[in-house]
Image (cartoon, rainbow, N blue to C red):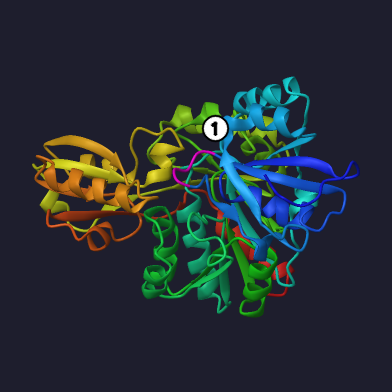
Amino acid sequence: MTTQQTTTKRIRTLILGAAGRDFHNFNVVYRDDPATEVLAFTATQIPGIARRRYPASLAGGSYPDGIPIVDEAELTTLIRSHGVQRVVFSYSDVLHEHVMHLASQALAAGSDFVLLGPDRTMLRARVPVIAVSAVRTGCGKSQTSRYLARRLSAHKLRVAVVRHPMPYGDLEREAVQRFATRADLDAADCTIEEREEYEPHIDAGHVVYAGVDYRRIIALAEQQADVILWDGGNNDFPFVRPDLHVVLVDALRPTQVDTHHPGEAVLRMADIIVVTKTDSASGAQAAEAVRRARAINPHAPIVRAASPVTLDDTQAVRGKRVLVVEDGPTLIHGGMAWGAGYVGAKAAGAASIVQVLPARGYLASERIELARAIEDSTADIVVSGTPHDLAALLKLTKPVVRARYELRDVDEPGLWTAVERFLHGRGL
């Protein structure tokens, strides 16, 4: 717990998080609030992020010793032993039921349970902001962001890609991050999960901003761009107020349109709804996704998009025993059994799929384990569906073929027509 003096006038507060939304909520709502004392953050979802400390340099003058980060499993004990009065839920891509189970723990222990909304937590930028969000992890936010970044750049606009945070290491060092080259990723010792998001943007010539303190991050990005593109993580709502909010629904998971928090809230906020992966889903699935999305948000236009998968070398895969490595979040958090790598391998005529692995790599030990699992596999070849260069990072000797997937408009007018209309209205 924090060591600063407590008073009856300060509301003793815990912030439940997963190294992202929790820090942002603290920074913009509670850091300078004289009526609040944040005793601790709790951590879940991501391995190795508890037992750290939110540093004093980021926590502000009221927290000279910083703020401890403890495991969420200690929630009830912390509330009762420290007289916690308020618990603030601050992470995403969880079932509504999960949120209410935590609320029940907090209420039973005697604490209030709070959800902070967009109006209190969204920052304002001096340049137009286009945001990409989704109802679930794995809907296709990354490819949609890449699609928009390319099209915006083709219109001679300077684009700053601001990514939802993934600060899993030294928080002080990661306060404000700017990635323009792969060397920047190496210098920051980025995890596989970070590389999956940042590397494709960098390879396309776009600069990515991320970190912990988004007031400073947005201030830096808006100095260097005509447009900010918020590349949302999980299914969270943006940290910066969007002028155009694009929200994705997955045609392969039509029943999950309104099952998760804050995905349902994000869908209700949407200016444009994109139903993705219509080329992989059945017509009935896509129609059901449209129907359910329309029931939640009857006002936003709905467009359909495809996610065609291409392999760098189709011939190398045909007739072979294949190990597929998919992007980590889609399998681990999104609940999918397979992704683009599997689709590409099957379409290429693989003799069999030996195994499907997530590209898990939050920790160095996990990267070592992943490399060992790949090298020890009985597969003839690896198909990598993760967006970054897995073979180069892990220094693999087993042959690897990359599966690449990009967003493609199905409808006309489609997503880009709506974005062009927005740009014209802004004089861009």
Main SS of the magenta part reads loop
> Going by the image, does 392 lie left or right of 98?
left
Q: Is 163 situated above or below 11? A: below
Q: Is 216 situated above or below 299? A: below
Quadrant the C terminus occupies = bottom right
Quadrant the N terminus occupies = top right
The residue shown at (46%, 42%) is 138
Q: Nearer the viewer, residue 360 or 285?
A: 360
Secondary element type, mark 1: helix
Q: Confirm whether the magenta stretch covers residue 45.
A: yes
The residue shown at (56%, 30%) is 73
Estimate the x, y position of residue 297 in percent, counting from the top left: 70, 37
Q: Nearer the viewer, residue 359 or 339?
A: 359
Q: Nearer the viewer, residue 77 or 166?
A: 77
> Going by the image, does 62 lie left or right of 365?
right
Asked which quadrant contains residue 113, the reply is top right
Q: Nearer the viewer, residue 307 or 11?
A: 11
Q: Which residue is mark 1?
A: 289
Estimate the x, y position of residue 236 in percent, counting from the top left: 61, 45
Asked which quadrant contains residue 102, the reply is top right
Image: magenta residue range? 44-48
Asked which quadrant contains residue 62, the reply is bottom right
> Going by the image, does 165 lie left or right of 351?
right
